[in-house]
Amino acid sequence: MSEQTVCGKCQGTGWLLEDAGGSQVAKRCVCFGQRWKQSLMEQANIPRRYQTCRLDNFEVHNDSHRDALKICRKFVSNFPVQDVGLAFIGPCGVGKTHLAVAVIQELMRTKDAVCYFYDFRDLIREIQSTFTPDSTLSESDILAPVFQSEILVLDELGAKRTTAWVEETIFYIINHRYNHKKLTLFTTNYLDTEDEEDKRDSFYKKGDESLISRIGVRLRSRIYEMCKVVQMDGDDYRKMAKQASYRF
Ligand SMILES: [Zn+2]
């Protein structure tokens, strides 16, 4: 529904008056719920290229996809009772972001949940941009939806080299959500191993691409505490689909 369309039933007030035994009772018009859902979708900050991502149009290519989809459906149906989020871990193009976005779309649509999407790099960049003297936004403007949303998607965690400042900031955000029992969905390309001691050693190895090398030990263990890990693998389907669409 566009903003210009005024509901013919309630003339845009969102209320309907109904007769109830001589007196009138105000009842919510159906357009009120539709407008609410619409505004949830609009404020969720989902990039245009992901806006059509749904659980129903997720392509299952292997067992890890099948399992991941099942976990996502369960997550949606359990909401808001569960107390852990999801961490989608796997290589590029296997559909991690598709699923994370599909989950929040479904939660907005069926549960009226307040959701928010942030690309990890954008979040860091936008917080940093508030430090410049001519910035019109403050750090708390950026962080308000990040803290307040019932579900936050933090996409491509670790897709930026960690500095002490980045690590501290992200830990502060994640920890704030954890302490307030808010669920977070992460996606990350950086593969992980079970053995923390090994990874701590390889932290100093050149060219290491583990999650720990990207976000640090403390943040990784907090994420494991607050999320169910959804391991995904397969080929880069996004690239394959794109290539297949180029006709020569
Ligand atoms: Zn109405």
Image: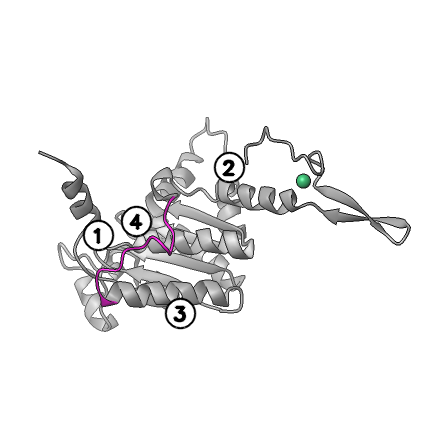
For badge 1, the amino acid type reads Cys
In the figure, residue 17 lies in which quadrant?
top right
Q: Position of residue 144 (x, y in %)?
A: 53, 46
Q: Give the mark, 4 or 2, whose residue is nearer the N terminus.
A: 2
Mark carried by residue 225: 3
Q: Give the mark, 1 or 2, whose residue is nearer the N terminus.
A: 1
Lateral position of residue 15 relative to residue 148, left or right:
right
Q: Position of residue 244 (x, y in %)?
A: 15, 43
Mark carried by residue 234: none
Mark carried by residue 163: 4
* Alpha carbon distance from label 3 to label 4: 23 Å
User: Would you say the residues marked 3 and 4 are in contact, meaning their CB atoms lie under 8 Å apart?
Assistant: no
Q: Which residue is mark 2?
A: 138
Colouring of the image: one colour
State the extent of the magenta-drawn residues as a range. 52-63
Local crowd at mark 1 within 10 Å, few (<14), some, or many (≥20)? many
Res. 218 in view: no
Q: Give the mark, 4 or 1, whose residue is nearer the N terminus.
A: 1
Res. 112 in view: yes
Q: Give the mark, 1 or 3, whose residue is nearer the N terminus.
A: 1
Q: Secondary structure at mark 1?
A: loop
Q: Secondary structure at mark 2?
A: loop
The secondary structure that dominates the magenta segment is: loop
* Quadrant in which the N terminus appears: top right
Q: Position of residue 206 (x, y in %)?
A: 13, 55
Lateral position of residue 80 relative to residue 210, left or right:
right
Which one is nearer the viewer's eye here, 126 or 57?
57
**Disc 4, ligand 1: is the CB inside 8 Å?**
no
Q: Give the mark, 3 or 4, whose residue is nearer the N terminus.
A: 4
